[in-house]
Amino acid sequence: MADALMLQPDPEFVREVNANSGGELKKCFQCATCTSVCSLSTEARPFPRKQVLEAQWGLKDRLLGDPAIWLCHDCADCTARCPRGARPSAVMDALRMAAIRRMAFPRFMGSLVGDMETGLIVLFISALLLLAIALLPISKFAVRPFVFAQMFPKDRLEPMFFAVGAFVVLALTIGTVRFIRALRAAGARGPILPALVPALLEILRHRRFGNCNAGQTRRLGHLLTLYGFVGLAAMGTAVGIGSMFGLIDTPLPNLYPLKIFANVCALVLVIGISILVAKRLTDPEKRAGSSFCDWYFLALLGGIGLTGILSEGLRLAQSLDWMFFIYYVHLSLVLTLFLCTPYSKFVHFLYRTIAMAATWQESKSPGRGQLRPGGPEVVSSEGPGLPHVMGTRS
Amino acid sequence: MPSPESSSRERAPILVVGGGITGLTCAIEAAEAGNPVVLIEKSAYLGGHVAAFHRYFPKLCPPPCGLEINTRRLHNNPKIEILTLAELESLSGSPGNYQAVVRTAPRFVKESCTLCGACTAVCPTQVPDLFNCGIGKKKAIHRPYPMAFPLQFRIDRSACPQGCRLCADACKFGAIDLDQRPAKKTLRVASVVLATGWEPYDAGKIDNLGFGRFPHVVTNVMLERMAAPDGPTGGRILRPSDGKPPRSVAFVQCAGSRDRNHLPYCSGVCCTASLKQATYIREQYPEATITVFYIDLRTPGHLEDFAAKTVAANQLELIKGKAGKVEQDTETGNLLVTAEDVLKGRKSTREYDLVVLAVGMVPQSSGLPINLLIDEFGFVSSGPPGVYASGCVKRPAEVAASIRDATGAALKAMRNRTNGAGHE
């Protein structure tokens, strides 16, 4: 009995994944249509059929460390083709949520994933924190020209943000350690550090996104969101540090290159988010598969972009009535995003990148089966799929 | 001594709708038990899908053989009236005393036709050969297929050029009447057997499997014609567009079956049919690779034995995993089939010369002028008293099961002739 396999089903895990994937998990009859129509699953690492089976069986440990759940880009091709309506893409999404929840530090914050109440509480706490900063004794409030520092003095705001930032970095680090441990335990043994560069290049190019049959719209939306966000995050950090050390004086002049760049990034972010929201609303599969987690993250990012642009516009218009209020909302959303990073869908940027790196080697050298006469295996090519040629039915 | 009313009731025949293997069997069984029968058939010939099959499973004998015996029984039985190109237009009344209106489309060729073929030789126009599932064409005036019964030519007037009379002029026997009109006939019948059968699922709707886009993707029904000696290639299985002998063939099971996007049910015959068809390939190509991609190999009852023997004797490769994607290599026209081998947990894409989609059965239950109880999949659950569904319109079935069901339906229909309402 050396080959005996001891399975440890976790019924609670089955219930959780079933509930978070639309309650159709047990409809799957393992036909594997999903895996064959998926453009991202490879010969060596096929998904999502196997993951759905393991979810039905409650094999929690295998699933939480399975890089495949992060290699899926949630295009829902599989759900569209599923003959049973078992929603494999929603199962993969529920598995990602389950993983985020269990990698979370501190653990109790893990409940934020998919939980509306916790999400709103975090938003509320952020707003209160900022209100406290704004309402502390005001020195030079409302002196023309109005600048945001009048309401949110930099010497209080910046240390607070950096403190929160440091906490988030700590939480992400611990999450990363937990995630890599889970990956290794589940058998993903590829080197991560050396593969980070090609994985990041892939993320910048989004080629895998393009391979999903769901189309180029979503790829464009995600790419714009990514570029816009990365640009803004880099700018925000640079300006924050610069102004804290007195190197930069805000507000920056309108035609200052960094300012122009940041404005472009904000526009790109808002356009990207709009595309993603439109896709979720119009594509019936995506719409049905969208969870609170998905909408919360989109709303945060989109809200940050919009309120940011609006704040700047109101400041330029010197509209005292609104500029501080909108900026207050803006900062609350930014702080919420900070606090939520390790516990929301946002953290996919980290786990997906690590999972892609950990499987980079195997994805470049697919396990080629022996060639069979007459029906040899063909390794699927990278890039767009084979063109469909119109043939005549004779 | 029977009363005049009951004797007239006894004279009312049984109406059998559909001349496939189920309808044929039902009509012959009832007639041989002494009951008059009217058998109506929508197409120009009897035999239905079975007439187009190359072989039966599990015995792998040719269906024309059994059909020939049935034809002979029909010939010898004066109690059966056969109407081809005929459809039921309305049905009213009650068991024992139904009024059936039957509409007959013109054949344009009379019984005096001697099958000499002079008409076909002069016919200037062609129509798709539907008996061969649209593989190839035939003249507008044709014999539906060599063994067709009734043995008469017919004309598909949809393709005739305006005013063309070439065939009528060429016929030495005056058997062609281009002025025939549709006719209606009202029949008094005691009971009705619905044996309208099935049609293959439209494979073009399964867009991930490439049928209709890639010429070398065919259906299981087409493969029967490709293998049949009276088929378009004289029985040689060749690739449809370039005529090359296939070196590798993939059977894709559940093509549109057990699938909520297509047919949610299992037709129960396609697995055995594909194994049967694999023997056609093996017989002609001893070296060919033959792969069957399946979800579950469903060969119920005694067919399990057939399956085991066929797989072993023909070196079939079975892969558990639905082939979800068929693409075409632009240069060679070969097909790339992607599937995950569930038992090995490996996904692969493999190249084949020919792909056969095992499509399921769609019951022909719609458009009938009868108030039927139809189930969620389109099969007839039940009809009004004195109306009995039989064969594949009732549930998907193989030929042997359809024949058994037809015999049972004949018995039920016979009771309405003697007992009026019968014992429902």
Image: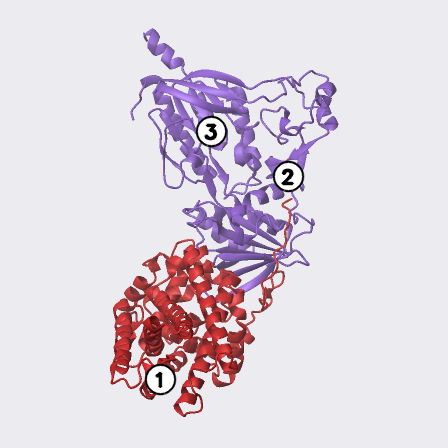
Q: Amino acid at mark 2?
A: Gly
Q: Position of residue A37 (x, y in %)?
A: 50, 60
Q: Is residue B332 above or below residue A258?
A: above
**Gap in angstroms between the C-alphas marked 2 and 3:** 24 Å
Q: Amino acid at mark 1?
A: Gly
Evaluate whether residue B102 shows in this view. Answer: yes
Picture quadrant of residue A110: bottom left
SS label for mark 1 = helix
Q: Is residue B317 above or below residue B363?
A: below
**Gap in angstroms between the C-alphas marked 1 and 2:** 76 Å
Few, some or many residues within 10 Å of mark 3 (<14, 14–19, 20+): many
- What residue is pinned by disc 1? A165
- What residue is pinned by disc 3? B23
Few, some or many residues within 10 Å of mark 1 (<14, 14–19, 20+): some
Q: Position of residue A286 (x, y in %)?
A: 41, 59
- Colour approach in the figure: by chain
Q: Is residue A210 above or below residue A252?
A: above
- What residue is pinned by disc 2? B231
- Image mark count: 3
Contact (CB < 8 A) between labels 1 and 3?
A: no
Q: Name the image quarter holding the N terminus of chain A.
A: bottom left
Q: Which chain is purple?
A: B
Q: Which chain is red?
A: A
Judge by depth and name the residue closer to the eye, B404 or A116.
Answer: A116
Which badge, 2 or 3, is on the more N-terminal residue? 3
Q: Are marks 1 and 3 on the same chain?
A: no
Q: Position of residue B334 (x, y in %)?
A: 64, 57
Left or right: A132 as drawn, with respect to A373 = left
Residue depicted at x 35% and y 75%: A327
Few, some or many residues within 10 Å of mark 2 (<14, 14–19, 20+): many
User: Mark 3 belongs to which subunit?
Assistant: B
SS label for mark 3 = helix
